[in-house]
Amino acid sequence: MATKKTWVIITAKELVVTLMALCCIVSSVAPVLGASLTALNADGNNNITPGDLIDITGTGYDNNSEVTVSSTVNCWKPIVDGKCQCTMEDFVIPANTSFDLSVRRVLDNVTLVIKWGIWWTVKPGTTSFFLFDYNTSTSTSKVSSKKIPPALAGTYSIDVLGRAVPNETNCTMITTAELDVYTDATGNFSLENVNTQGIPICNFTISATDGTNSASTPLNVFQLGDASKDGQVNAYDCAAIARYWAGIPGYDDSSISKEAAEGLAGNCSKVELEDARCLARYLIGWEDSIPCGCT
């Protein structure tokens, strides 16, 4: 028996209504673009030398909502003489910023030595402004702060000191600073002329979330000559890069900036990579002289 075909004829008006309904269905299942975040210097890129002013821009967040902007620094430092030490020199802390830090491979709570006008030492029990916590199972010391009031905002130097776990070669410090901002009616926000003074030469990431939408972006923090990534250019950079080439434990690609060492020529305490290689070879008796003619 042949199958009977049935033809359905619709009017132009019905066709338009049908197409509109299909468009609504498609749009309801189409992927929604998420939030995005940029952090750029005056040249429009994310290659940051400490002290650069950067503009942070976020889009795609909820309209007229609170967004938490976080900057996270992840540093690896060689353990020297049984001590873990991480330094932030002349670090700019805006008002209403809170921060926390986590230091791994230490025996107990770390000590903060902070310069704001004068040097003052912060340990557990010395102030209620900082909260200390030590996890024995992970050998991790954590310190968190309340929001910095406007009267205390400014430029700080901070030394983080801890007793290292025996037989370890590196310690790790993760520092996160948070600041709350608000989006406009289109879900966008911006922070202009954010000062990067005092940022350590480490892995650096900026993130922002409103609880539903999140985004992050890295910064390539670089200081020419600072091979040891301690925020300063001095004789220790010569020693650090030489130890790197000599293969001394604790001096590896995570703790040394080989690119920064390229700018160290012209001074006996500042050497190029090839000079540092020569120094390393001299220290183990493979060369008759050391770089730059130093004695």
Image (tube, rainbow, N blue to C red):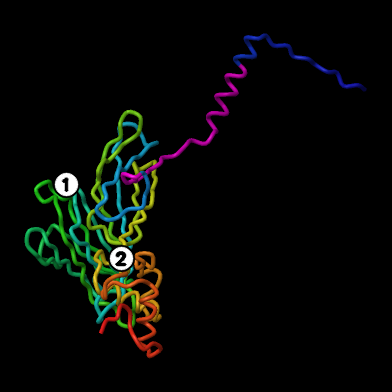
Left or right position of 175 against 11: left
Q: Nearer the viewer, residue 83 or 42?
A: 42
Q: Amino acid at mark 1?
A: Ala
Residue found farthest to the left? 118
Asked if the stretch drawn in magenta spans residue 182, the answer is no
Instruction: Write the residue at 34% across / 65% down.
Output: 260
Residue tagged 1: 95
Residue depicted at 14% across the width and 51% down the height: 154
Query: Circle 1: is it few (<14), some (14-19), or many (20+) Cα within 10 Å?
Result: some
Q: Is residue 26 left or right of residue 196?
A: right
Residue 61 place in picture, x, y as percent: 37, 37
Which mark is on residue 180?
none
Q: CA distance from mark 2 to mark 1?
A: 32 Å
Mark earlier in primary sequence (2, 1): 1
Q: Is residue 131 above or below residue 105?
A: above
Q: Is residue 144 left or right of residue 56?
A: left
Decide: is 136 above or below 219. Answer: below
Residue nearest the observer in this picture, 154 or 122: 154
Amino acid type at circle 2 is: Gly
Taking the spot 30% from the left edge, 52% from the top edge, the residue there is 71
Q: Secondary structure at mark 2?
A: loop
Q: Measured from the top left, where is residue 282 in percent x and y?
A: 36, 86
Query: Percent x, y for residue 249?
Result: 37, 80
For the residue labelled by badge 1, is the local secondary structure a helix, a strand or a loop? loop
Is residue 32 located in the magenta-colored stretch of the structure?
yes
Q: Which residues are magenta?
A: 18-43
Mark identifier at residue 225: 2
